[in-house]
Each structure stands twice: as C-alpha cells, then as structure tokens.
Image (tube, rainbow, N blue to C red):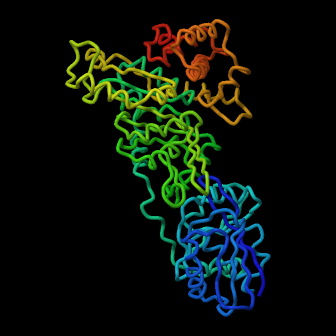
C-alpha cells in the first residue's frame, strides 16, 4: 500500500489543464475521500470507480482509508471523464499496478458500473493539452481513438473497458469486451446543412455584380458583412454560397476547429479532421448561450465559436433577441468569446466571418421610391425595427451592401455568364496567400484580424490613399474604429488586385464597401479583367 499518481486533463473552455490524480491507500478508518475542488459529478465518481473495479474482477482496497487528491487543488474540476484516471490511480496505490507504467501517460474516459468505458466530449483538446505537457501515450474510449490520433507524436490506446486498460498496463493479453456505445445526439443539425451548402455555386446567381465583389472581398480578408434589402432580393442565397468560395482550412486551423467541435460534442466516431470552413445559420429565436456560448456546468462553445474560421449567418438579424445582439460587440472586435463566472473565466476563439442580413422593414417590402414600395408598415414601426440593430454593432461591420432584386431581363438572359465558386475561390486563395506571407510569424492570419496600430506602423497606406481616408474622417463619416476597418479593407482590395500597397483606388473602393455606396464601374471591370 502506498501513493500513486495518474494523469488526466480538465478543460476550461478550450484550454486544457493537466490534473494529477494522487491516491494514498493506508491503514485507518475505512473511507474514500475525494479532495481538490471536485464538482458533484466527480464526487459520485467514488462509487462508480469502486463498482467498476469490483465488477472487472479486480481488487478494490475496501478495508483501507483511501484519499484521492486532484492536483492542483485550487482549480475547479468537473466532468465524468476523470473516472478512468481515478480508478487506475487507486489500483496503482493498492499495488495492483506497477507505478512506473503510469509515467508520461494520460487517462480519459467515463466508467460504467460494469467496468466499461463511455464516450466523453472534448477528447481532442484534452489530448492536445496533455501532449503539450510531456504526455507520450493516452488511453481513451475506443470510439475516440481516431480523434485522439490527430495529435502527432502520441501513442493512442482505444480501449473498451477498465479490464482492457489494466491488462495493457500490465503487459498482459488484452481480453475481449463489449464495444463502447458512441455518444448519442451529438451530431449538430447545422452540419447536415453544411453538406447542402457545399453543393451550391456562385454561378447559380445572375447579376448582383456589386454584391458579388463585396462578398469576394469579405471572404478574402475575413471581414464581417451585412446585407440589407427587400425580401426575395437574394440575401440568403448569397450568404449560403460564401463557404463555397473559401479555401480549405490550413492544418493549424483544421486542428483548432476540430478541437472546438470535439469540446462541443459534435464529432462522431470515425470523423476525421475538419478540412472545410464551417457554416452555421441559427434561427433568430436562438438564445444568447446558444449563440455566444456558456451554459450550466462546464462552458460549451456557442455557434459563434463553432463557426470559427468559417461563416456564421444571422438571417433576419433585427429579430434576434436584444441580449444576443448586444453580446456580439466584444467578439466582433476581439475575435474571442470570454465567458466570465465567479470561479473561472473561459476564452473561446471566434474568428469566423459574421454575415448579417436584414430587411428594410418588418414586412420586407419597403422601397425608398414610393412608386415601387408596397410596404404596409408605419414609419414608427419601421424605424423601431431598424433601431434594434444598434450603431455599436454596425460600426463593427466591415462591409455593407444593399441587395436589390435582379431585373427580369437580366435574370432571363441565357448568355449572361456568372463566375463559378471555383473561379472566385482561386482569387480568394491567392489573396490569402499574400496575407499569410505578409503576416508570417504573427498571431493573426488575415487582414480582417490585423491590429490597427500595427497596420499603421508597418504597412501604411500610400499618401494619396491616406489623404482620402483622412478627409472622410474629418468630415465625420468615419469613426476611429471605422478608419481601422477601412485600412484593413483597402489591404484586402489590394491583395485581390495583386497590388503591393493600397493607393487611392483601393482606399476609395474600401470606403464604398464600408459605407454601402455603389461601387465604381471601373472597379468591377478590373475584377472582371
């Protein structure tokens, strides 16, 4: 009898902390004590682990005093995934396992009373955190083996039961066991829509050259986009096709996004790395927690983080709850979601494209020209509808476009050619490669993420372009935040055009994209050329 330590990981958001499960088995009053700020689910682990050990045909030190410390003791801990580490630590302290077999090893998994292993959420970020702290092999439930194997230079054991884990640690033949049931209900409905979205193509859209160029700029630089216009103008059709012009994720982005979806419980057994940018379009009645993240117990990523490196489309934006609209301010500015509680503060990445769409009025039929308007809304109601969006949110949107319905003769023109998503994606990918080269070694990847002071100091605009931007600011048409966003847009316009430094034309285009003003014909002709 003695002391043994097994390792596992606890998550705070997407950040993993290594937990040392230290167990002491010694003479004294028979009891099992669990200390180290464990939540109620972990307190119940004492009974789960005891019955799992006994029903696996192993020996639980039932006549001894068992003290289990979850270290560091000041860190709040929760979740059932610590069961396996607790059981292994107790067995090692009782002399059932050699302690040396626990070195550089992490254990993740929930135990059933029969000794079987159950799936848990967040395996990939937990394994990533363990590897960063020197762990060289990890034991996980069998359905999570492929997920854990995404982390390089790590030996992964996918096991079905505690008995199999003990046999492997002892170097004995691993017995057969019942397969582990996969997590139920974890596949998000949004991913069913993802497959449908990937089948769409920009070539399906006739006309809309002005809006198509604005979407291309937003996609190339990772800029937030707002589409306004009457119902039926094509706002949703445009937004749904944005993922088709985005390039595949880089290996770093893919691993980061896959870890977020693992934390959300959205990966099914056999799923590999996510290589395509995600797309999500929640209903306007969605709650703040479902969009931003949070929840009771452990913090779960919301739609904003699940769309990291992809597209989050909020259709009918003025109809979203006020607390959702207001909560978007900080993520739009920083690219992160911070969920603060009394005992913890969790940071989740949220560097996706936010695409907003709104009608000009509640009925969607308003037109500035009274001859074309069939709107039945009163002026008071229309103003109240538009006021729900709020200036603080719109000031954080980079690109604004008013979408007008395509003329019937243009829509029926069989000879009018629309570019395919593949053609647009090639230009977007080339522009992103220019940004990757420019920002090599930085913590950001795209123009839309670059800090304003750094752009001003290291990548200033050409003098004539800067003068035009200063004029707009002095005229009061731009806030200080707006100036930074126009600088970012100008660099993206220059990257798409293959220009080394934004000048007068690029800044003028950026100002028009920012304000919603129509683009010059010369700009669209350069793009077509």
In the rendered view, does 314 fall on the left or right side of 264? Answer: left
The percent position of residue 398, horizontal first and vertical second, equals 52, 25
* Residue at image coords 53%, 37%: 352
* Residue at image coords 40%, 47%: 287
The percent position of residue 102, horizontal first and vertical second, equals 75, 73
* Residue at image coords 32%, 29%: 385
The percent position of residue 464, horizontal first and vertical second, equals 64, 6
Q: Is residue 299 visible?
A: yes
Q: Is residue 76 above or below residue 320?
A: below
Residue at the limit of the structure toward the right, as seen here: 100
Q: Is residue 127 above or below residue 101?
A: above
The percent position of residue 454, horizontal first and vertical second, equals 70, 25
Q: How many numbered marks, from 0 up?
A: 0
Rendered-image quadrant of the N terminus: bottom right
Residue at the limit of the structure toward the bottom, as seen here: 63
Q: Is residue 496 visible?
A: no
In the rendered view, does 465 fall on the left or right side of 269? Answer: right
* Front residue of this view, candidates 508 and 215: 508
* Front residue of this view, candidates 8 and 141: 8
């Amino acid at each position: 009898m003695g002391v043994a330590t097994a390792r596992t990981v606890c998550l705070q958001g997407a950040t993993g902390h290594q937990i040392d499960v230290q167990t002491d088995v010694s003479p004294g009053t028979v009891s099992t004590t669990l200390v180290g700020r464990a939540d109620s689910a972990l307190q119940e682990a004492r009974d789960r682990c005891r019955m799992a050990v006994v029903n696996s045909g192993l020996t639980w030190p039932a006549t001894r005093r068992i003290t289990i410390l979850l270290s560091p003791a000041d860190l709040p801990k929760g979740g059932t995934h610590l069961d396996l580490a607790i059981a292994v630590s107790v067995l090692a302290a009782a002399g059932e396992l050699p302690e040396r077999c626990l070195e550089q090893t992490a254990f993740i998994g929930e135990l059933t009373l029969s000794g079987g292993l159950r799936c848990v959420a967040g395996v990939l970020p937990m394994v990533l955190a363990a590897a960063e702290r020197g762990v060289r092999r990890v034991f996980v439930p069998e359905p999570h083996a492929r997920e854990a194997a995404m982390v390089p230079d790590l030996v992964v054991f996918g096991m079905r039961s505690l008995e199999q884990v003990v046999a492997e640690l002892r170097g004995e033949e691993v017995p057969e066991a019942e397969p582990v049931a996969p997590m139920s209900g974890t596949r998000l409905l949004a991913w069913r829509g993802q497959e449908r979205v990937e089948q769409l193509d920009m070539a399906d859209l006739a006309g809309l050259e002005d809006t198509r160029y604005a979407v291309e700029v937003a996609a190339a630089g990772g800029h937030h986009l707002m589409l306004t216009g009457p119902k039926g103008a094509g706002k949703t059709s445009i937004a749904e096709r944005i993922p088709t012009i985005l390039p595949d994720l880089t290996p770093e982005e893919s691993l980061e996004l896959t870890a977020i979806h693992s934390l959300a419980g959205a990966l099914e057994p056999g799923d590999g790395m996510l290589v395509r940018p995600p797309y999500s379009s929640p209903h306007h009645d969605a709650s703040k927690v479902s969009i931003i993240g949070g929840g009771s117990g452990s913090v779960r990523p919301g739609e904003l983080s699940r769309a990291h490196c992809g597209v989050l489309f909020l259709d009918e934006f003025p109809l979203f709850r006020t607390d959702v609209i207001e909560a978007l301010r900080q993520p739009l500015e920083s690219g992160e979601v911070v969920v603060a509680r009394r005992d913890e503060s969790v940071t989740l990445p949220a560097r996706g494209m936010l695409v907003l769409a709104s009608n000009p009025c509640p009925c969607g039929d308003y037109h500035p020209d009274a001859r074309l308007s069939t709107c039945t809304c009163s002026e008071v109601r229309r103003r109240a509808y538009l006021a729900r969006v709020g200036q603080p949110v719109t000031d954080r949107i980079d690109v604004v476009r008013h979408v007008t319905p395509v003329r019937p003769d243009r829509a029926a023109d069989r000879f009018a050619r629309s570019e395919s998503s593949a053609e647009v994606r090639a230009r977007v990918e080339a522009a992103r490669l220019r940004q990757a080269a420019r920002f090599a070694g930085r913590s950001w990847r795209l123009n839309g993420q670059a800090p304003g002071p750094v752009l001003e100091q290291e990548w200033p605009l050409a003098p004539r372009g800067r003068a035009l931007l200063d004029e707009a600011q002095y005229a009061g048409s731009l806030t200080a935040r707006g100036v930074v966003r126009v600088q970012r847009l100008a660099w993206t316009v220059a990257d798409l055009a293959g220009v080394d430094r934004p000048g007068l034309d690029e800044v003028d285009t950026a100002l028009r994209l920012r304000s919603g003003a129509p683009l010059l014909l010369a700009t669209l002709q350069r793009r077509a050329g």
